[in-house]
Image (tube, grey):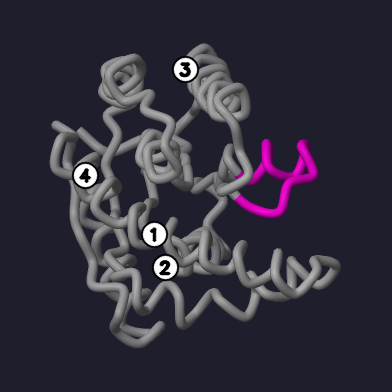
Amino acid sequence: MSIEYFVLAGPQAAGKSTLCQHICSGNSTLIPLQESRQVIIHNCGKKGAIFMNYLDELEVIHYDMTRMFTILGQERRGSSYIDETNVFTLGHARAHGIDLVDGYFRQYLDLLKRFKAAVIFIDVPPTISWDRRRYRYAQRLWDFADQEREETMTRYRTYLDRLYPELLEIYDRLDLPKVKIDGSQTAEEVLRASREAFLMFRGA
């Protein structure tokens, strides 16, 4: 039975969005879904996930759930969906001190099983995430005073360190078809491995 729904996950700066664009390019049967966390962050006008509060996190989950229920109620006609992060948003919440796993993990898993979902996890350790992302973080804080900028950069770095094991724990708990790809490889190698995973799951 072929896979209808892919969760593309991994730490910050794993290249998920770029990878999704490459995978979907020229393939009309693959439909990319914007990461719910980024939608909420944009709507709230916040400078990253570290500034999200409990209600923001609940809004992300509600957005995810509503979208999945909507898609399940549609006639999909052979299409497959690629959803960035999805259930792994629970790991993001935990990384900045908001624990929603016990309340929502089973709901996510039940919906993903209805989709016959599979998970592709791009594995990037925090040191690499930080090297790839810190310049962008600094750009976000252009209007901060020096001390506030330094303190916030420290919070970003701490967040990456806390995020990584939380995402791995979510991955290990998921009773779904899944594959972990070494995201510290070159972009070409990661893309090749990811394409192979998509083809494997779609032909399952």
Which numbered marker is on residue 11?
Answer: 1
**For residue 28, side relative to residue 5 (left or right):** right
Name, please, the residue furthest toward the right.
143
Mark nearer the N terminus (1 vs 4): 1
Label 4: how many residues lie within 10 Å, few (<14), some (14-19) or many (20+)? Answer: many
Which numbered marker is on residue 171?
Answer: 4
How many numbered dots are placed on residues in this image? 4
Q: Nearer the viewer, mark 2 or mark 3?
A: 2
Mark nearer the N terminus (4 vs 3): 3
Label 3: how many residues lie within 10 Å, few (<14), some (14-19) or many (20+)? Answer: few
Residue type beneath disc 2: Ala
**For residue 85, side relative to residue 120 (left or right):** right
Which residue is under mark 3? Answer: 72
**Residue 137 part of the magenta-drawn span:** no
Mark nearer the N terminus (3 vs 1): 1
Residue type beneath disc 3: Leu
Occupied quadrant, residue 112: top left
Residue type beneath disc 4: Tyr
Label 2–label 4 contact, CB within 8 A: no
Mark nearer the N terminus (2 vs 3): 2
Q: CA distance from mark 1 to mark 4?
A: 12 Å
Residue at position x 47%, y 47% in the image: 84
Q: CA distance from mark 2 to mark 3?
A: 28 Å
**Residue 39 part of the magenta-drawn span:** yes
Q: CA distance from mark 4 to mark 3?
A: 23 Å
